[in-house]
Amino acid sequence: MARFADRLVYFPSRAHDGGTPAALGLAYEDVYLRASDGVRLHAWFVPAAAPRHTVLFLHGNAGNISHRLDKLSVLNELGADLLLLDYRGYGRSEGSPDETGTYRDAEAAYQWLRARGLPAERLVAYGESLGGPIAVDLAARQPLGGLVLESAPTSIAAVARYHYPWLPVELLLSVRYDALAKIGGVHAPLLILHSPDDEIVPFAMAEELYAAANPPKRLVRLRGGHNDNFMVAAEAYRAALNDFFQRGVR
């Protein structure tokens, strides 16, 4: 059962006011798919000129896919076909977000890519912030060629305890998004990107996830805050991803 504080986890936006891939001069396909419970979801499929791999991009808890064009640009330039998914309640996707639903949504996007003939070893799940635990859940259940976690929490409860240590978090939250409990079940190559300056998800959580994960794995320290580290540390961000795509993906 949802609890009062659960509504503070999700900050969806319906309007695609961040633009479309066309603003970057990129061709794209509007994709509509259904989760296992029937919810209709929207995504963008953006092909690369000379694709080396495919990335399933699972965004954070605010906005929608139209607000991730900067990262789309980097990943496209690095040779990734990209599927950017809006969870239920975000953008043009139906419904309203909840923990189980977002897991279903990621699974539906994964199955859509596999149904197009994509081998699992060429598919990378990329989880940004809240998308990190969603990507971990997917990677623990399905074969992947790689997993990228950017500014990802160990769990939502842990983030809440960090910021509000005096509150009874377990009583106020029903959502968990417990990546730390699941990451041991992931056997794909792992790249963790996180800034020690992150003001929302402490860097110690990246270290905990790294310690609990199976090899091969790499933790890269970025600079900047939770939402701008990929720009502040643009060179390190791009280099880490390029290296991972070249060597970390099976």
Image: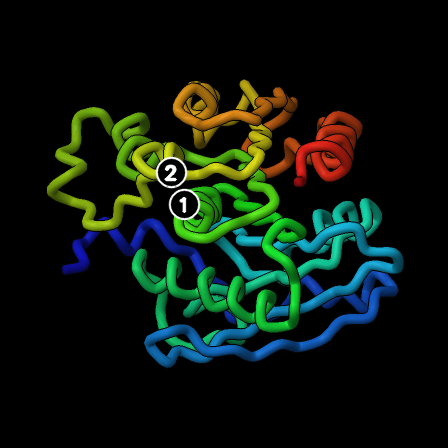
Instruction: Classify 10 Å Cα crowding around label 2: few (below 14), some (14-19), many (20 and above).
Output: some
Numbered label attached to residue 61? none
Q: Quadrant of the C terminus?
A: top right
Q: Looking at the image, which residue is at 44% across and 38% down?
A: 186
Residue 146 x %, y %: 59, 42
Does 152 sit above or below residue 55? above
Labels 2 & 1 near each other (Cβ < 8 A): yes
Tell me: 214 left or right of 48.
left
Which amino acid does the dot numbered 1 rest on? Answer: Ala
Tell me: 169 left or right of 241.
left
Residue 165 x %, y %: 22, 25
Secondary structure under tag 1 reads helix
Front one among 78 and 221: 78
Secondary structure under tag 2 reads helix
Query: Quadrant location of residue 64?
Result: bottom right
Front one among 42 and 182: 182
Q: Looking at the image, which residue is at 34% across and 50% down?
A: 9
Q: Looking at the image, which residue is at 78% across and 64% down?
A: 47
Calculate the distance from the C-alpha at mark 2 to the C-alpha at mark 1.
Answer: 5 Å
Which amino acid does the dot numbered 2 rest on? Answer: Gly
- For marks 2 and 1, the one nearer the N-term is 1
Q: Quadrant of the N terminus?
A: bottom left
- Mark 1 — residue? 140
Instruction: Classify 10 Å Cα crowding around label 1: few (below 14), some (14-19), many (20 and above).
Output: some
Residue 58 x %, y %: 53, 53
Tell me: 65 left or right of 180.
right
Numbered label attached to residue 185? 2
Query: Quadrant location of residue 157?
Result: top left
* Coloring basis for residues: rainbow
